[in-house]
Amino acid sequence: MNNALYTAGIRAYGLLLKIIRPFHRKAAQSVVGRKDLFLRLQSWRSQHQGPLLWVHAASLGEFEQGRPIIEGLKEQYPQYKILLTFFSPSGYEIRKDYPLADGVFYLPLDTPNHAQRWVEILQPEAAIWVKYEYWANFFFELKRKEIPIIMVSAIFRPGQRFFNSNNGFWKKVLQCVDHFFIQNQQSADLLRGIDIHNYTVAGDTRFDRVVEISDKAEAIDLVEKFVAGRKVVVIGSSYPAEEAIIQDKTEQWCWIVAPHEINSHRIDSVKARWPKRAMLYSQLQAGEALDGDILIVDNVGMLSRIYQYSSLTIIGGGFGKGIHNTLEAAVYGQPLVFGPNYQKFDEAIGLVRVGAAFSAQSFEEFKLILQKLLNGEEVRQEASKAAKDFVRSGQGAKNHILNFLKTRLKHRI
């Protein structure tokens, strides 16, 4: 790999987005969202002059990891403007109006010309990138301009391109980073193995974020009305695989299903599974009478608060590409159940290790684990305590990073 080949690949990707735009919703959002991007950025910067910090998140999950840092910076350094960028439409479209950022933009495609123009317009004091996305041309340009790059909640795994035998290009990209705040010791060992030592094992800022969310969680009156004193199983970010395991109706338990995709086709298909048992949250809002023991959440942004009502949570994605956020549920102290594909997530591995989460290799095993937890009060209590203790003990990454920025960048901030 060299820079010319890398950049050619980026340009090919940009062309592909334009070709598939008529047939692919996210591709269309990506292309339209980047239209006249530099003109809009220039106009925004002329109206928001002064020192600036640039925070980049690939998508919504990475934004949640970066959010505690943005909030801390805004509180400590209100004189600084904060620009937030996303690469993915799923992050930008949901958080484009985030109030603590002075501006929210798509990141342009990573070509040398784009990187040079972008940095020249912004002239940031520092670039804070969350978890991953190592865009080479942006990193090279920031390094050339002597603008510090701080990676937060970064995580590395064996087999990544940075650590293979032909890693010269990607090692140069990593060497542009001023400091890595990494999640675990394995990441430290991998960086040290390629002679990179400017890192701190600080943990994951998501722990700080979910504790903040749970401490401030407000009641949801309509959900409480639906629950009506029953125990609750929440299926968070569900796929058909998880939805298929819902048990027969009981008086003691009710179910709340929050599908991963929220669109009319998906919601209709979920409700069609239980035509006489399920109702939509929007129907509750419309004042329809309660009818059934399954509530389908047909909106975005409520799931993290719904977890406060759960006695047992099923996390979606484990029978597909990988599970979704486990910490949002675990912070409330509840057992978690998910499919076999969780090994890429340190927090999920940790939850399984301490007995707070249970992973099933098959649908049959999934149902057995679920039945054991539904019927076993003592087992649930032990897992609940383990979950809450695990999350609370993981706090602290936010303060590590903010203290570093205060000292290392004191000539800038």
Image: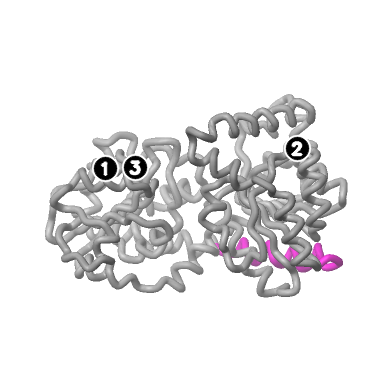
Amino acid at the residue labelled 2: Thr
- Helix, strand or loop for disc 1: helix
Callout 3 crowding tier (Cα within 10 Å): few <14, some 14–19, many ≥20: many
> Is residue 135 shown in magenta?
no
Q: Residue at x 52, y 48 (%)?
A: 90
Where in the figure is residue 223, as x and y percent of width and height? 28, 66
> Which mark, by number, is residue 239?
3
First in sequence: mark 2 or mark 3? 2
Please give the residue where the numbered disc 2 appears in the rendered image: 111
Q: What stretch is highlighted in magenta?
A: 395-413
Where in the figure is residue 283, as x and y percent of width and height? 25, 61
Cα gap from disc 1 to disc 2, whole angstroms: 42 Å
Q: Residue at x 33, y 55 (%)?
A: 298
First in sequence: mark 3 or mark 1? 3
User: Above or below — where is 317 with respect to 230?
Assistant: above
Contact (Cβ within 8 Å) of mark 2 with mark 3: no
